[in-house]
Image: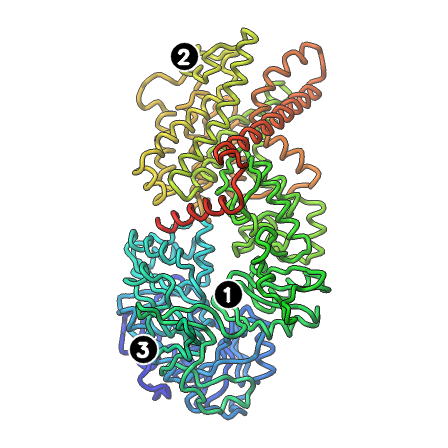
Amino acid sequence: MRASILSDSFVDRLADFEQAPALLSGDEVVSYADLDVRVEETLERLGADRRLILLHGSNTLESVVTYLAALRGGHPVILVDVARREQVAELCARFDPDLVVEPGGWQERRLTSRHELHPDLRLLLSTSGSTGSPKLVRLSASNLQSNAAAIADYLGLTAEDRAMTSLPLAYSYGLSVLHSHLQVGASVVLTEHSVLDPGLWSLARSHSVTSFAAVPHTFALLNRTSERWYDVASLRYVTCAGGRLDPAEVRRLVNLGDRHGWQLYVMYGQTEATARMAYLPPAQARAHPECIGHPLPGGVLRVDQPDADGVGELVYSGPNVMMGYAEGSGDLAAAPVLTELRTGDLGRQPASGLFQVVGRTRRFAKLLGHRIDLDRLQSALAALDPTLVCHSDDQRLLVGVTTADPLRVGDAAARLTGLPPGLVSVRQYPELPLLPNGKPDLAALCGLDEPDTGFQSGAPEVADSESAVRAAYAEVLGYDRVDPHASFVELGGDSLSFVEMAFRLEKLLGRLPLDWPRLSIRELAAGCDRGASASGAPAESDCQPPQQSVAARARRRRWVADLDTSMVLRALAILMVVLVHLKVTSVRGGAHLLLGVAGYTFARFPLAAVRDSDRVGGLLRSLARFAVPSVLFIGAVAAASDSYGWTNAVLLNQVLGPPRWAQSWNFWFIEALVTILGALAILLAVPAVRRFERRHRVLLPALLLAVGLLLRADVLSTGETTLRYSRTHLVFWVFVLGWLVQVSSGVAGRLLVSAAVLVTFAGYFPDEPSRGVAVQAGLLLLTWLPCLPLPRLLAPLLSRLASASLWIYLTHWLVWPPLLGLGLPRPLIVVACLVVGVLASTTVNRLEQTVTRLARATRKGGAGDASGVDQHEQLSARRTYAAAR
């Protein structure tokens, strides 16, 4: 083997671990011995003369082998994110690499370098490069080796550990995962899956990964999904770095790890220190979640020139401190210029002995694990607006403008920083808020002085949009005022209010992200007009492809509305019911499709609540909103005529009514749904069942589906198969099938649910095959197409029909018989049934909202609805509870 220039390092000792697995990529398992051979082969291709290499880094086997070969041969590598084309072009122009390695091949510029390269230089990484800055961090052989060894030391890594590339390898944190595992002969699963992709967690489980590396935003994303990432059985520890993790979130993760058998390491670092500088031991995370912990082995951390409160700049020294910066090819030969690193962070060391970061000395933002040089970004954007100001509240990039188009500024800032558009907030001012000394008032820019207005995100109307969204939430859900940080689910929204709320939001904001019920009002107002979810979810999770120009999106929005599929199906199903009863069409199945959609929305709303009490309470509220009006209406009709009896009014006709079809069975759907929801409320009141559902979101409905199918088949030989398409225990399985559709995830999960839909309905309606096909088609649409693009002119009609589906079902029985007796055309009678149902629904909804508002005001002691502060405290309490779980 060729002698390595990087002596006695992890890259030099690959062969020592022989046949142990080193890298796992797809179906390929590469042993350390095999990896060593591949590195040598690539090193031969790189040549003996040191050259400057620009490598498009990706989480692939080819990229990792090329990188390791360059390290072994002493070739300095500029490692860049393969997606950052603009940055690559600027770096090529500024540093003139001798070799460019791209995913499609090698671009040989010269065989001998024209640059003078310092003998210790190994790696060049961007630090604030997400702003487009060409300044790179120069890292030496000893920087890389010392940091890899220190990280492996404090994490207690062994050859049995296995990580996965949940972060880009072009990011120092993600790269340190590879280095530290190769240091001890552990293995790494290479994947380019996003953390929101179920495929990542399938890999984690199938490959028995022992660790998961994340930045704070990762947990914010995962918290908005139903992915149970935390119960990967093989997990030993989870690490978080790349920004400040909220102390409440630290405690939540610590508790989560305690329940599932893994530990949390909160870490602190900068690319200038190769990756890591400090870590918070898991044993101290619960008591001191606000701290960054101790310096890593071999490092020293101190507070420079502390003030009276002990606060000063954090300064770090250790063998992992960079050689210095490089702003051009002339810096590649420079000797190390630093013995310690001034971090730019203000910190202190309280009595616990642990270090704590309390602020910053320089204008850097840290979002998604990358530092953004705010001054450099501000200069880059100044051509659009010379008065423009950039700032950050550690959650978003904030830009204040006076003359520029906010859409244009937002797009430029997102492009330069690489941030998701939902994390870039642009607000337009007549004049920027200033302090008495004439400097920008950053507190006002952060919105600290106006908590109820929020920020614009890409359009000057977003502050107004937030107010409009809050007003819509308050009106639909019966509040006087709502907290802008609250979501639809947190405010008690359910399937009945969902349709009206979605329709209003779509008119206010355009395309809605799929998870909008879980997004806060502020996130919705800040993100939707930008064409991206504020949660940062990938484009495929949204209803409308975001890869369009602003003008194209505007044109599309003018003519096309992306409607939630469950909403469309509710409208079509109730229309089918009316058409069938009037014999306009013979295609039946509308009521059974409504039952499946009800199961879907049951899993989407009551089961989406964080607290157990909110789950059961939300289910009971939905049950009451469905059952009480139905009982009152049917009771009134029964009292006024002899068409129905008391068994109908109390929704017990299926138990006490005639064992054959009669007019009194008209409301079988209402009875079945109320009974099912009541039974599930009782079931979920059992703590063990709630725990089981949280842990096995798919398994519980799968087991209930099996039970429902056994009841349908009458395996108990009760003989209760009369009215087999109407009795609760015989149609329960249809509701559960809709539940399964909602909780299924990933292609494999959706394929399995689709197979269940096809198999269970096969032959179910032997005399009416079209009836089964209609229900199957609806459930398959719900499985594969969460949103449907439809002509905008149809959106109001479908939304009104969907929101009024209950009342159309209740009232149409009274509308069509007398009108038909008058000899009116059946299409006209259909319209009359729909209009009466919509009017009844609107009236009852307004009455419910008024009663709800009055009830809340009464509970507040006559002081009106919850104030912003009180409601925010309630919301915080809920989230604190969630964190404590």
Q: CA distance from mark 1 to mark 2?
A: 63 Å
* Residue at 45%, 50% in the rendered image: 225
Quadrant housing residue 777: top right
Question: Dot 1, crowdedness within 10 Å: few (<14), some or many (≥20)?
Answer: many
- In x, y percent, where is residue 722? 42, 16
What is the secondary structure assignment of the residue under circle 3?
helix
- Amino acid type, mark 2: Leu
Looking at the rendered image, the disc whose residue lies closer to the viewer, 1 or 3, is 1
Q: Amino acid at mark 1?
A: Leu
Could you tell me how far apart the alpha carbons at marks 1 and 3 are, in whole angstroms?
A: 35 Å
For numbered disc 1, what is the local secondary structure?
strand
Q: Is residue 51 above or below residue 480?
A: below
* Towards the viewer: 410 or 656: 410
Residue matched to label 2: 656
Mark 3 or mark 2, whichever is nearer to me? 2
Badge 2: how crowded within 10 Å, few (<14), some, or many (20+)? Answer: few
Residue occupying image coordinates x 66% and y 57%: 548
Residue 64 visible at all: no
Between 387 and 144, which is closer to the camera in this rendering? 387
Q: State which tag comes first along the sequence, 3 or 2.
A: 3
**What's under tag 3, amino acid-wise?**
Leu
Secondary structure beneath disc 2?
A: helix
Residue 653 position within the rendered picture, expressed as x and y whole percent measured from the top left: 44, 14
The Cα atoms of the two marked residues, 3 and 2, are separated by 77 Å
* Residue 37 image position (x, y, % from top left): 35, 78
Q: Where does label 1 land, which residue?
A: 367
- In the image, which disc is placed on residue 14? 3
Instruction: Give the colour scheme of this rendering.
Output: rainbow
| 516, 595: nearer the viewer | 516
